[in-house]
Image (tube, helix red, strand yellow):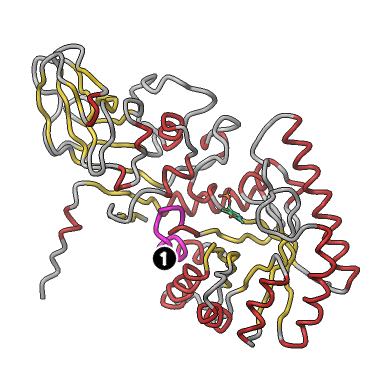
Amino acid sequence: MDAYSPWDSYPAAAHIDLKALAANAARLRAYAPNARHMGIVKADAYGHGRAQVATVLAENGYDILGAAQLSEALALRHELDAAGFNHVDIFSWMLPPRAPETIKRALAAGIEVSVSSVEQLRLLQQTQMPARVHLKVDTGMGRAGVEADQLPELVTELLRARGSGIETVAVWSHLARADETGPDAAAATAAQQQRFDAACEQVETMGLTGLTRHLAATSGIIWHPQLHYDMVRDGIGLYGLSPDPTHASSEQLGLQPVMTLTAQLSLVKPVRAGQTVSYGGTWVAPRDTWLAVVPLGYGDGIPRHASNAATVLVRGTNPIRARIVGRVCMDQFVVDLGPTPHAPAAMGDEVVLFSAGRQAAGAVDNCLSTGQVPSADDWARCSGTINYEIVTRVGARVPRHYSN
Ligand SMILES: *Cc1c(COP(=O)(O)O)cnc(C)c1O
């Protein structure tokens, strides 16, 4: 038997610290001690690996997990059952409009689903399966959810559907600005709360009683304790990242980033002043210097917007905080190690793109400010995006290494 796998020696890896994940779960519980907690594992658990993350969450007391798409929910059901957690419920909130067979299988597997319209309810009814439904109301997100003026019609249909085994078990919504500070965001969140309360009351008055109410994701859990209701949805906080690092860093929130992304330098070479780097020649060496090639690119989820901006930590003889020079390519990018007489690092040396080592607090706009390890927050700032996107987009090509 040949157990050899080339992926074991892939020159990059996303290291997933499952101990940090468990600590974050405990931290979120402390923020919302009286609510049931749903662990959100959509998009391969924000890039961290769904099966492994789901197992740790189940081991740490989660009895319901959430995934966006029914396909992921079905895979999750399989993974949980295989790990011996068939008591853990699954909620999935996006119904595929042209996949009756998938909906049928999901309902057969007991997956709870969301309904925002009568049309969506019909998708469920066409399967002739019993179902557990979370009624989604739009309270200001302007995305999924039934509008207030169409709520009575949908509730009437849900009441009627009870006869065919479709049971409404929850009413829920999603906050749009719960991470922000300032009066506008506070007013928007307060308005959402008011609309949610009104919807819950109306639904109950019309006869759907005893429903679980859930509204808050991580930002609501942390910054809006009055919005915890019966259940909260733990997302980015589980992965140790702040919903808004300009508001409070991971560290300030007591969260530990779970993912560390590393690679091995595939080449170190000296170049002369005037050497241009990568497509378009957007960077020109201002002096003789040492360059290193990092074997990760946008094909691995490295943002092309990080070109000439983000920094990495090269663990050579001495650690070097090196900046990306030139454009990020599909499979590789180049960093400037600086002008030293001798090579400051060697082929094979480890480079850390981001890790738990430092979490940016506030508006630190100088990407080269410290010699410490860059964080996913740093990458987000340098790339004009959010930390959610940095970790979630780490490609399937990058092996995940798990530690307990
Ligand atoms: C992604 C998501 C969450 C989790 O949000 P975080 O900000 O990551 O905590 C919760 N609810 C819904 C509907 C989501 O799409």
| Left or right of residue 367: residue 348 | left
Judge whether residue 176 can be spotted in this image. Answer: yes
* Quarter of the rendering containing residue 187: top right
Residue 184 image position (x, y, % from top left) = 75, 32
Range of magenta residues: 45-55
* Amino acid type at image mark 1: Ala
Callout 1 environment at 10 Å: few (<14), some (14 to 19), or many (20+)?
A: many
Question: Which image quadrant: the N terminus?
Answer: bottom left
Q: Is residue 50 magenta?
A: yes
Q: Is residue 145 above or below residue 157?
A: above
Q: Residue at x 65, y 68 (%)?
A: 114
Which of the two residues, 23 or 128, is positioned nearer the viewer here?
A: 128
Q: Is residue 187 above or below residue 285?
A: below
The residue at which mark 1 appears reads as 51
Which of the two residues, 236 or 160, is positioned nearer the viewer here?
A: 160
Which of the two residues, 31 or 339, is positioned nearer the viewer here?
A: 339
Q: Residue at x 20, y 58 (%)?
A: 7
Q: Residue at x 44, y 72 (%)?
A: 75
Residue 43 image position (x, y, % from top left) = 46, 57
Residue 146 image position (x, y, % from top left) = 74, 61
